[in-house]
Image (tube, rainbow, N blue to C red):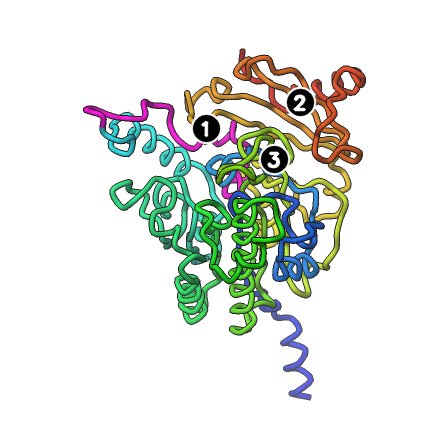
Amino acid sequence: MLRLLLAFCLTLLPAAAAAPPNIVMIISDDHAWTDYGFMGHPLAATPHLDKLASQSLCFKKGYVPSSLCCPSLATVITGKYPHQHRITGNDPAVNRTGPEGQPKLKNPAFAAGRERMKSLIRATPTLPRLLGEQLGYRSQQTGKWWLGGYADGGFTEGMTAGDPAHGGRHGDAGLNIGRKGMEPIYDFIRRSTKAEKPFLVWYAPLLPHDPHTPPEAILAKYRDKVPSIHVARYLAMVEWFDQTCGALMGFLDQEKLAENTIVVYVSDNGWIQNPDNPRYAPRSKQSPYDGGLRSPIMFRWPGKIAPSLPGGLAHTIDLMPTLLKACGLAVPEGCLGIDLLDPAAVAGRDTIFGECYDHDMVDFDAPAKSLKWRWCRQGDWKLIQPTSRVPDAVPELYNLAADPMEQTNLATSESARRDALLQRLDQWWQPAP
């Protein structure tokens, strides 16, 4: 009888709360949406990302809002569009040299603009800040990070000091991750696990970003298979990046952490390698075309997220709400994305939007002063609407199902569709004149 009474009393106790999931965010840098095995590239060897895709909720029609590193990363960490978080470019628009010809890193106006950028991100709820404040997460920044030091973004630790005196404006020591091993991440995960704390890892290496300096053993695989050494180097960098992803996911398996870790993948923006030089080709980075904006978006959480390939549209504004809801937290006001783990929300979305700006920010308080293009995709149709900052530009409309490389502008022949999409674009955001 006593045992039965005890058992009954135990059923009245609340169930122990499940441990919050760890989160590992993998963000490649300057990586075209086409350049993965699972996306159909005939040469790019990405076996580890291919495996991740097979284990994930994988959106092949994923997008970033802007095809430039800093505004794109700011959207990933805040869940807001560039015109909302106001980080629309990589640098403040100041003269490239300071007093007596000093480089821009020593220009007082440049430094003041950088301080304004940091103040904006400090004033915005970010994913690591919310997880730390509400659930006690430890968070680590590694790799590319434009927005000051790691603490400015709400990380509890990191590799970027944020002081130009330490070597740069967008990563300094953080840019060593991946290219010079993964041990800082492994050490952070071990320490967090030992302290019994949930963790967030921001792995945003300078890969496959230039300089394209892959190991010779990888480069040798591509030298004779592509039209130029520049293309060979880029593809070798893609494979090198993939190897680091495999090492990171292997570490999670080794430490028996994979089961309660959400792995998220996206690229910050696209890249099409120019075969004639080390730079990017037109219609990729800094452009409004899919070569600069599109990226697969993946979520892996074994036993919690069923692997699938939904046909809907995904956007990096969705990462913040999706991850917060997975952790049981409310989504901050102003985050307009959807929960990508909710099939009804994905099915109910018909249009996504974005905006591309000058490299340098003209006015933090008036984003439209730097705006070059707005764009939207509805189903297979994509509209690109230029501003007067793009000389001689005209509206562009593409059927991406028939024309994935956006070669045939249908804006004139499909004028009714063009006008309807422009109306949707204006309803989303109507910039000031």
SS assignment at label 1: loop
Residue 99 lies in what quarter of the image?
top left
* 207 relative position to 402: left or right: left
Which quadrant, please, contains the C terminus? top right
Marker disc for residue 425 = 2
SS assignment at label 3: loop
Q: Look at label 3 and name its amino acid.
A: Leu
Alpha carbons under labels 1 and 3: distance apart: 25 Å
Alpha carbons under labels 3 and 2: distance apart: 15 Å
Alpha carbons under labels 1 and 2: distance apart: 22 Å
Image coords of residue 307 (percent x, y):
72, 58
Give the foreground label among 1 and 3: 1
SS assignment at label 2: helix
Residue 320 appears in the picture as rendered: no
In the displayed structure, 284 sits above or below 40; it is: above
Start and end of the magenta stretch? Answer: 74-101
Mark 3 sits on what residue?
Answer: 336
Q: Look at label 1 and name its amino acid.
A: His
Marker disc for residue 359 = 1
* 107 relative position to 37: left or right: left
Image coords of residue 34 (percent x, y):
66, 45
**For residue 253: magenta?**
no
Residue 283 appears in the picture as rendered: yes
Residue sitting at 58 percent across and 59 percent down?
Answer: 221
| Mark closer to the chain start, 1 or 3 | 3
Q: Is 235 or 229 nearer to us in this picture?
A: 229
Residue sitting at 42 percent across and 25 percent down?
Answer: 361
In the displayed structure, 297 sits above or below 397; it is: below
Numbered circles on residues, count: 3
